[in-house]
Image (cartoon, rainbow, N blue to C red):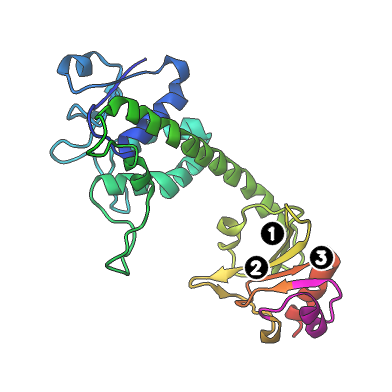
Amino acid sequence: MNIVTHDERFHADDVFATALMQIVFGEEAEIKRSRDSVDIENADIVYDVGGIYDDSKNRFDHHQKGGSGERENGIPYAAFGLVWKKWGEKLCGSKHASDIVDNRLIQVIDARDNGFSTHEKKHEEYTSYSIDTMVKTFLPSWKEEADYDERFFKAVDFVRPILEREIELARHKVEAIPLVEKAYSDAKDKRVIVLDRFIPWGEVLNMYEEPAFVIAPDLLTGKWKMIAVQEEGFVNRIDPPMEWRGLYDEDLQKVTGVSDAVFCHRSGFLCIAESKKGIMEMLNIVLNK
């Protein structure tokens, strides 16, 4: 598979798109950095160079007049987003998982490459250290030899595990959806959703009005958590007592009467006990206060 992107300076856009090509095509991906018209014409896939966006011909540039389109939210596509639009769903196993990766990672990179800001700047002297900034650290400084190709592929090696991990996490998140749906369906009291292990639940439970708490064990410690389902603005649907907040161990045990109570967050969104029995005792106090 003969693949071409542009040479010289690089950005997160073309670096991540190259990592994607390596994931999709493996050892068959022969990637050349060039602006030569003959190389571009003879390539099987071209991205971020060439002045054409035509999915049917595997041409994925966005620098031409009029660009290459934008998402429904107004964020324009760059080369990474264009190649992801073609191969992302196949890699992720579903459109839902593909959209998760696009929302978390790809849109941010596309926006930056097109000069769009995705974050509100609250302090004039502060600039976030973004993934785009990380990629730029691989560029040579004024004191270093300008071997762009070597540095480009070092950057690709750096970002590829990030992209692979985002794909894997998105798959896992989608796989959790039916498990959370079943837990909600099985719950006698829809205010309380009990999970036998911690899995991503927010996307599902936020669609329903009733859930106020998720009860689940901590994967690392085995302790049990009571997590408040929150409305917009981090507002708990049901609050634990104010006198619990910010307390640990014996102090919390005294005010709750629960012998293995461990912690209550100062905002009230999280309570922890050593056992499931303990956390259910804390839950009952909250629901009946």
> Distance between the Cα atoms at labels 3 and 2?
23 Å
**The label number, if any, that marks residue 211 in the structure image:** 2
Q: Earlier in the sequence, mark 2 or mark 1?
A: 1
Is disc 3 placed on a helix, strand or loop?
Answer: loop
Query: In the rendered image, which quarter contains the N terminus?
Result: top left
Identify the mark at residue 274; answer none if there is no mark.
Answer: 3
**Residue 25 x/y as whole percent:** 44, 20
Mark 2 surroundings within 10 Å by alpha-carbon count, few (fewer than 14), some (14 through 19), many (20 or more): many
Q: Residue type at mark 3: give it.
A: Glu
Q: Residue at x 64, y 79 (%)?
A: 239
Disc 1 marks which residue? 184
Dot 1: element: helix
Asked if residue 70 shows in the view, the reply is no
- Horizontal and vertical percent for residue 221? 76, 56
Q: Residues within 10 Å of mark 3 (few under 14, many from 20)?
A: some
Q: How far apart are marks 2 and 1 (CA)?
A: 8 Å
Mark 3 and mark 2 lie on one chain; the one further toward the N terminus is 2
Q: Which of 197 and 36 is in front in this view?
A: 36
Depth-wise, is mark 3 or mark 2 nearer the camera?
Answer: 3
Boundaries of the magenta span = 245-262
User: Measured from the top left, where is residue 156 in percent x and y?
Assistant: 40, 31
Q: In this view, does 75 lie above or below 149?
A: below
